[in-house]
Amino acid sequence: MKRLDQNNFNVVNKYFVKHTGVISKITDGIITVSLEGNLNCESCNAKAACGVSESNSKEIEVVNADHSFQINEGVDVIMQKDLGLKAVFWAYIFPFILMFTVLIIASIFLKEWIAGLVSLFVLIPYYLMLHFYNNSFERVFKISIVKYKE
């Protein structure tokens, strides 16, 4: 994702999701941002699955080499809208499809209750795989922050 500035952001607003937050911790190029409630979540198609709009105490970590940020500074967290939909797909939709497919196939060969257990247990290696490929997902899901201007 290209580096954004606040002046350029207003022009491309329909392609990005902006969320207001406050920097709560800075360690070795990783900035932890505490997100505040956001009105933009109301118009998002993925708000039910996202979870950001449900609570005011969400924190995210942003990799940033720019050392111009300070603790308790207001920032805008910016992410491409299509990346949010990809995240919902990998976290919720694909596991459901995987579990349902395994349930259908396993129910042909096994008893119902065993097929149900197998379809649930197939999620364990899936989420372990997501955990081990965490670095790959971090490279794909780039999140930027800019200083908050009213």
Image: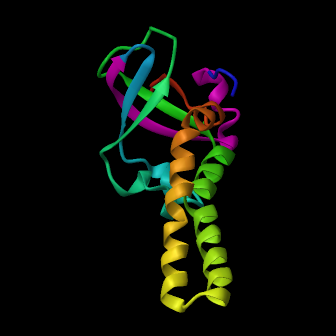
In x, y percent, where is residue 39? Answer: 45, 51
Tell me where residue 138 appears, x and y as whole percent: 58, 33
Residue sitting nearer the eye, 102 or 149: 102
Residue 50 on the magenta segment:
no
Colour scheme shown: rainbow
**Magenta range:** 5-26
Determine the residue positioned at 65% across, 83% down: 104
In-front residue for pair 63/122: 122
> Which sits in the foreground, 92 or 120?
120
Rendered view: 50 above or below 37: below
Q: Which residue: 43% across, 31% down? A: 61
Number of numbered labels in the structure image: 0
| Magenta-colored stretch includes residue 12 | yes
Residue 13 image-quadrant placement: top right
Can you give x and y, in whole percent of width and height, for residue 62 in the image?
48, 27
Residue drawn at point x = 68 percent, y = 81 percent: 105
Q: Is residue 147 left or right of residue 98?
A: left
Instruction: Report x, y in % for residue 3.
Output: 65, 20
Which residue: 49% across, 64% down?
48
The C terminus, quarter of image: top left
Q: Is residue 95 above or below residue 35?
A: below
Residue 48 left/right relative to 22: right
Q: Say which quadrant the N terminus sits in.
A: top right
